[in-house]
Image (cartoon, coloured by chain):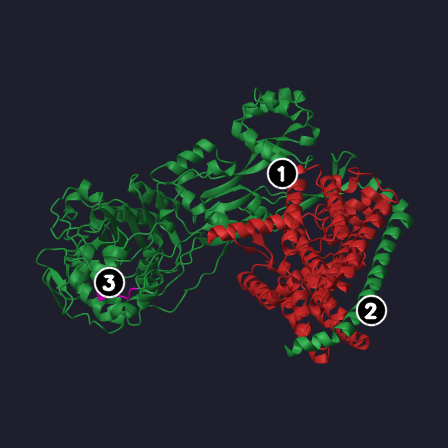
Amino acid sequence: MIDTFAIRMQRFARRVLRRPRVDLPLIGALIVLGGVGLATLYSAGGGNMGLVVGQAARFGLGGLLILVISRIPPPVLRSWTPWLYVGSTCLLMVVAVLGEGRGAYRWLDLGVMRFQPSELLKLTMPMMVAWYLHPRQLPPSWKDIVVVGMLIAIPAALIAEQPDLGTALLVVAAGAFALFLSGMAWWRIGVLVGAVGAVIPVAWHFLHEYQRNRVRTLLDPESDPLGNGWHIIQSQIAVGSGGVFGKGWQQGTQSRLEFLPEHTTDFIFAVFSEEFGLVGVIGIVLLYAFIIGRCLWIAMNARDTYSRLLAGAIAMSFFVYVFVNGGMVAGMLPVVGVPMPLVSYGGTSAVSLLTGFGVLMSIHANQKTHS
Amino acid sequence: MKLGRTAFKESRGEADLFRRRAFAGFFLILIGLVALVGRYVVLQVQRHDEFALRSQQNSIKPRPIPPARGLIYDRNGVLLADNVPAFRLEATPDQVPDMDKMLATIGSVVPLSDEDIETFRKQVKQGRRFDGVPLKLKMTEDEIARFAINQWRFPGVEIVPYLTRRYPLGAHMAHVVGYVSRIDADDVARLDPTRYKGTTHVGRIGIERSYEDLLHGTPGYELVEVNADGRVQQVLETHAPTPGKNLYLSIDVRLQKAAEDAFNGRLGAAVAIDPRNGQVLAFVSVPSFDPNLFVNGISGQDYHSLMTSEDKPLYNRALRGVYPPGSTVKPFVALAGLEYGVRRPGDTVLSTGEFCIPGQSRCYRDDKQGGDGTVNMVRAIELSTNTYFYRLALDLGIDRFSTFLRKFSFGEKTGIDLVGEVPGVLPSREWKATRSKAGWYPGETIISGIGQGYWAVTALQLAHATATVAGKGVPYTPHLLMRTQDGVDAQPLDVPWSSSGPSVITKTANWDVINQGMTAVINGVGTGKGLGIGFPYVIAGKSGTAERFSRTTNAYDTRKSTAYLATRHRALFIAFTPAEDPKIAVAVILEAGAWGAKDSGPIARKLLDQWVVDEGGERPAPPASSALPPPAPAVPPPTQEPADPSELAPADAASTEDTP
């Protein structure tokens, strides 16, 4: 019994490695991006190889996940979806209960490793919305929109409560993009956006004081040059002083002299911009645009509604990462904890992103032409 | 199936719809990315000159100033933990030209152990190349002087002053105050990075851990001007940190030391509590250890010897050691009988030396062959008559038994302000259900009545329960923190603590009966006879002797040698005084004592003697040793082990009581 299982696993592993079902242009772009990320991390970490090796190991793990997940056919993923969604939402509740009265609490300690259940939702959320819309008549009716709204709101509220506004934003975006791609009528989108706009003043009331401060500081960073404003001012100095061609790799003074906080994680893009300048920024933005475009192309060629919506939502939420982090670093958006994908140091985010690409590869491998 | 067909039907239309949406979405994304790049163009082209200048002139940055940690005092202001200046040797990897050569040669100036170097190398790998990494903490004056002369040989290595924690009383208070140690990787994930900027140490155990929030304080910062290499040129502005609060513990160091001395090196624990408010007056676990060893990183050798010592000095016996309570639970069981109306004080039981469950052949023994005759409740507590409590436990039933005793925090944490407390075990149906599928047996109720079977209590729980009875049934969560103080000049503020629940005793008359029984233990012909001689107040108490091993034969063991018995028994003693208006309650547990009253009793008495002195009285004359109860034969509990329960019972859970 065990033998057959081992043999089967062996065969599976051999198949995975010999004929990986991946989209080569996409994988190539991801490898380039990862390389740029590691190089920037080496510089931002002050030449700390430990940091780079750790991150590279996570990329390796993520790559393995891509290979394995790409072998799972989308219909199987679809049949798992409700369980994955309910399971990850339950974990969020566990964290909420454990974290009662302990300030910011996001981690679940499994003994061997700790992880943030909210990371899971970045993937299970678009899966769930796609699962729900898959058998329905599209474009979705108001009823479907309300149901999807509930599916999004419950976990998002739990995450926002942690409080982790950045992740909540990404989870909401992933769900909303699936809805958008399902063909929700433009006028309905307009009504919804209007309604959300009307709710913002109310939501402001529910934000934590530190979150409000971050927004206030964005509007006037000089008002608090040592607290929240420090991040924004120093980050902009880093970006602006980089100029068109940058100061050169490992030559950025802002992070090196510790003017720039969080320079390996959320603000690593400031280090990148300082050292590689506008040329580097445009280059990497083009790379991101290529990745998003390629993902959308895979989505368009997918075999069914579920795969299409899921692939499309993953692609578009990738944009949110880039836009929110890039905007934050450039002082255009408030400071929220959204990493620059595959560049920022941090395990959970890199692994969960690459898992998403694994799903994309699976959808790519099972597109119309194959069936 | 039906849905599937619908989806299939619409699939072409849906695919087109999706295609249109995907294009629209990508278009919007491109707009977003262009906007983003636009912002970078503004910063990097249009405003480049401005930012380039600011970057060049960016020479002022804030530097955190860690707060001074709050001091810890005992209730009378005796210093238990303070901060003293010290010097450490630090190397900045970026500025050391040849790391290996430096490490190889520096040992001749400042002796470094292989361990120091290994730790250093590890930290260098994890840290940033321009951050200082400590090579050696707490340098001696000699080392400082020698390095100062040779400093020119070691660029990038310097002496850095810092404040280090010191525990002047060392081992005396280690199990209460605990210690701080260096922040490690796990701590970094746990602690608020803003509050801990610049802080190197964090409370690890004890008060240092549980009141970390109060002790730590808030960091300040200074604005410093740095040159192009990042070296500080001058301090421009200083915003002082707010030091942590000073804490006054309810512990009385004199009492603590007296209790510790009374143990005379024998392993065990003692806890004294003020029944009027739950303040812990003494909290002793023997043996102890020197907490100062841990502050600046304990050497491998010291750590190894602490960890491998058979006496386990790091083990907090008062907080985490669990022992069968033996007969010390009898007053609490008696109270349960009164409160539930199962016994009136005058109800008597005939003790013949053996108690058998009606209708069964299983029998449980008294301590004395032939029994104590007819006893009422007061007499049963005084003589520690097993039969009385076997029957009482059986009449109460296990559910009422455990419900009542849980009110004393048996089987759950007392909630003391120390980290790591264990709940112990209160025998109950629910507890057994978590361990075994077999139901509850009446025999288990019977042996629970004399504090054996599944029972496991900590010295703290026993002291808390004693204090609760002494305080006429009003429970107070035991606590160590008494006052807090903002800075040395401020007025210390009392920390308010209120009772943690309604009184356990509903009628004063019930309290009188228990009090009478426990007073008779010391002042009548009871097990503790003679312990009260020469003491200015009336002491009420109860002894307990728990066997560490279950009996294997039916024969009465006649070996009486104290040394032999000490290897088999745990000796317990609880007491409070003055009996009419209790002001202090104590519990003493000796891990290896022959008899509760004879071995643990005197420890309790010495502690109470010191308390009299602390209260302003004269030191009472110690009771003559001849007045103490003579050792008596160990008497086995059940003649026949109850079959199933004994399998589950821990090996050392059997209990017996010393006889007068």
Q: Chain of mark 3?
A: B
Q: State the image quarter where residue B497 is shown.
A: bottom left
Q: Is residue A105 toward the left or the right of residue B300 in the image?
A: right
Mark 1 and mark 2 lie on one chain; the one further toward the N terminus is 2
Q: Which residue is mark 2?
A: B20
3D distance between C-alphas at marks 3 and 2? 76 Å
Q: Residues within 10 Å of mark 2 (few under 14, many from 20)?
A: some
Question: Which residue is found at the position 72% from the left and 43% from the top?
Answer: A38
* Depicted B88 relative to depicted A192: above or below: above
Q: Which residue is mark 3?
A: B444
Which region shows up in magenta? B438-451
SS at mark 2 in the image: helix
Q: Which chain is green?
A: B
Q: Amino acid at mark 2?
A: Arg
Q: Which residue is mark 1?
A: B126
Q: Residues within 10 Å of mark 1 (few under 14, many from 20)?
A: few
Q: Residues within 10 Å of mark 3 (few under 14, many from 20)?
A: many
Q: Amino acid at mark 3?
A: Glu
Residue B372 in picture, x, y percent from top left: 11, 60
Question: Which residue is found at the position 81% from the left and 54% from the top?
Answer: A290
Q: Nearer the viewer, residue B599 or A65?
A: A65
Residue B461 in picture, x, y percent from top left: 34, 56
Q: Which chain is red?
A: A
Q: Nearer the viewer, mark 3 or mark 2?
A: 2
For the residues bearing labels 3 and 1, Cβ distance under 8 angstroms:
no
Question: Which residue is found at the position 70% from the left and 65% from the top?
Answer: A307
Residue A108 in picture, x, y percent from top left: 56, 56
Q: Nearer the viewer, residue B258 or B581?
A: B258
